[in-house]
Amino acid sequence: MKVSNPFGKKYRDLCLPEGTKVIDMPDPERVGNPRQAIRAALADPIGSAPLYDIAKAKKAGKPSATAVILISDNTRPVPYKGEEGILLPIIEVLMKASYRPQEILVLVATGTHRAMSEAEHRSIIDPKVFELGIAVVNHNCRNAAEQTFIGHTRRGTEVLIDSRYLRADLRIATGLIESHFMAGASGGRKSVCPGIVGEKTTYIFHGAPLMADEKSCELLIEGNPVHEESLEIAKMAGVDFIANVTLDRSFHITGLFCGDLEKAHEEGVKKLISDVQVTGCGRPDIVITHAGFVGINHYQSAKCAVSSMGILKDNGYLIILADNTDAGDILGSVNYKTTLALLKCIGAHNYDRVISSPDWTFIPDQWQVQQWAKVFKRIPQDHLFFCSPQLSAMKYPLFPGVDGATVGEGAGEDYYNDCIRNIVKAIEEKEGGRKLTVSYIADGPYVSVKA
């Protein structure tokens, strides 16, 4: 049975085993006339005054007032250009409120991710932004000289924020509201934390205790300690206005949530939950999923693995399809690779014990490996098959799982289909030749599936 390849037309359609159950979420309705809808959302926001009024008031009190706009990096498909672009309409409102281009800064909220290149900036941002001469810069969580300490949270987090953001008089955060396996949902407060915080600020926010909390999970906001810590930090830093979107699987806008940091985001999360929850899926022997747009590297691919756990049965099998296109390291940072290798060597339960020890020195990116550990408490490491045409066989000894391209007859030109066919055949042979049940999560990390 054929289904569309989640990575687009550069690859052939996927050929799934006969009888595969395809799990996908219903198509939400797209926003009609997006240009008009974006301008309307900025003018009639949720829980706040219109963006123009806020911007004008800042200028009235200080004629030299400046503005900063936080945007997501290229791991998130936020529409910043084209008919559905949300960045240029924001800038047009600011310029109407008397902000000159040199008084507006676009700050890429990279969090702990690598910096984007100028070419990458231009690939995601409307060219008119550059034609106007508006500066676009990356946040660097490791550059202490660009950060300002503003206090501690109730949990003791040392809050360091990008100084360029704090110097601005008007602070706007943009982003995508999608399911998030730690914080419940992305968007809103996450543009600030972890988007523009210093590396030290992640030590508690992404520390072992918060990651291990049962409420640090997808689609849960209330009582989620990761959400709570992120929100507290964002409020300390100050956010005057947010512009968030929800998207369908083709990355078209299905909802606009502009206005107050909390109220607008909460409305967006309600919309998200109604769109992405799929229940009654059962627990098959084999789950096939994909890493989606976000899975530009192995680090980001953890999201689809954790999302699959709603139907992944004990000692079952998981096949991950990934298109790791990151211009940097397609595995992840040195810290990620180091802690991932530790997980492979000592196993999931021991990994959790080690990073929870008072003698353990916190290592940035250990949190993502802690998410992988959740998966390997459910299935053995050799029950995960990772299939990425960009990852060479030499890299696989660094992380848990099996190189899908090396199973059976190996993978050739029809990479993903060769992997699927060979892996399913090998699993069935291992299981005594019986016909196994297979489910395919068509929306990868973007859907919440429950048995």
Image: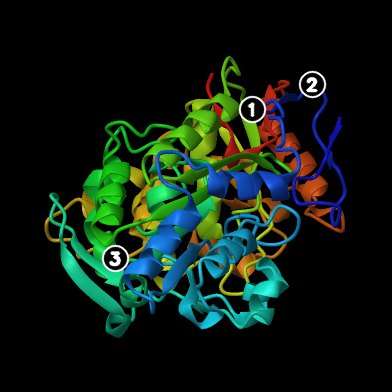
Q: Secondary structure at mark 3?
A: loop
The answer for how far apart the CA atoms under marks 1 and 2 are is 18 Å
Which residue is denoted by mark 1 in the rendering?
A: 431
Residue depicted at x 59% and y 51%: 402
- Dot 2, crowdedness within 10 Å: few (<14), some or many (≥20)? few
**What is the crowding at mark 3: few (fewer than 14 residues within 10 Å), some, or many (at least 20)?**
some
Q: Position of residue 206 (x, y in %)?
A: 30, 54
In the rendered image, residue 37, in percent from the top left (x then y), is placed at 66, 44
- Classify 278 as above or below 126: above
Residue at 23 percent of width and 53 percent of height: 354
Mark 2–mark 3 CB contact (< 8 Å): no
Q: Residues within 10 Å of mark 1 (few under 14, many from 20)?
A: few
Where on the picture, by quarter, is residue 183? top left
Residue under the point 61% across and 18% down? 281
Structural distance between the alpha carbons of marks 1 and 3: 39 Å
Front position among marks 1 and 3? 3
428 or 175, which lies in front?
175
Q: Earlier in the sequence, mark 1 or mark 2?
A: 2
Relative to residue 9, is residue 108 drawn left or right? Answer: left
Pick whichever, 308 or 101, lies toward us. Answer: 101
Spot the residue most to the top. 280
Q: Earlier in the sequence, mark 2 or mark 3?
A: 2
Along the line of sight, the residue nearer the viewer: 55 or 188 = 55
Mark 2: secondary structure:
loop
Residue 70 at x, y percent in the picture: 47, 64
Q: Which residue is mark 3?
A: 363
- Amino acid type indicated by mark 2: Gly
- At label 3, the amino acid type is Ile
Q: Which residue is mark 2?
A: 19
* Above or below for 32 versus 159: above
